[in-house]
Amino acid sequence: MKRFSCKAFLFDLDGVLVDSNAVVERAWRRWADRHQMNAEELLLTIHGRRAVETIRDVAPALDVEAEAQWLLQTEIEDIEGLKALDGAADLLASLPPERWAVVTSGTLALAKVRLETCGLPLPRTFVTAEQVRNGKPDPEGYLKGAELLGVDPTECIVFEDAPAGIEAARKAGARVIGITHTYPAAQLQRAHACISTLRALQVRDDGEHFEVQCEDIRQIA
């Protein structure tokens, strides 16, 4: 059993709170088809990163901002298959709103659409693609999330589903719990613990700190 103590929670969105993989992959497949690219190879690079960074890496000659905007609009308009991940609604409902935030590589508009479609509460505090100069694995987003909540990053637990996000959280100084929705536990070795869903957490709030317990599935396997 892994045990952690923290003052605040920072949640990645896609693959942690909502299941948007089908939507994301449909959009990127369409984008790959538009530019005669190998969609299967492209899909290996997209999770946990801002669209502008992926596009800049794979197609630097294109108008990166315009292509990212096309992807954004495509994803906003496509809500088929979006759903809250197991345990997300109950956990968020149990947390004081001033002690958690969403830190996502997507835009604010996209984050709101996905949370609202899935029936999840909107946080008071968002850190989205528009608010950072450098996306994950840079720690900027998680550092900003902790700052906006008024806590030190070392007093935060981050929930992430992708290696880039886990690296960002660790660079920020936070503890990280990996969610094995998008990647298997073997690819989330840098997380301090791994769980299959948020339902696996035991969280107790003593008013100042959260006491968190979970079984690390890497130790069970």
Image (tube, rainbow, N blue to C red):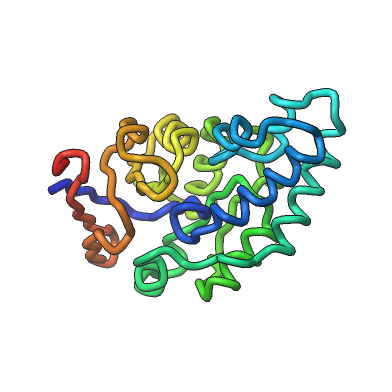
Closest to the observer, 29 or 84? 29
In the rendered image, the vertical position of residue 180 relative to residue 8, given as above or below: above
Task: Give the total number of marks visible in the rendering.
Answer: 0
Residue 187 percent location from the top left of the image: 36, 33
The image quadrant that residue 132 belongs to is: top right
The image quadrant that residue 55 belongs to is: top right
Residue 150 percent location from the top left of the image: 47, 52
In the rendered image, the vertical position of residue 218 relative to residue 8, given as above or below: above
In the rendered image, the vertical position of residue 10 relative to residue 152, given as above or below: below
Quadrant of the frame with the C terminus: top left
Residue at screen point 40% across, 47% down: 158
Residue at screen point 33% across, 59% down: 198
Closest to the observer, 98 or 136? 136
Residue 99 percent location from the top left of the image: 42, 61
Relative side of 88 to 213, left or right: right
Relative side of 214 to 177, left or right: left
Residue 74 percent location from the top left of the image: 75, 55
Residue at screen point 74% across, 46% down: 30
Residue at screen point 35% across, 68% down: 91
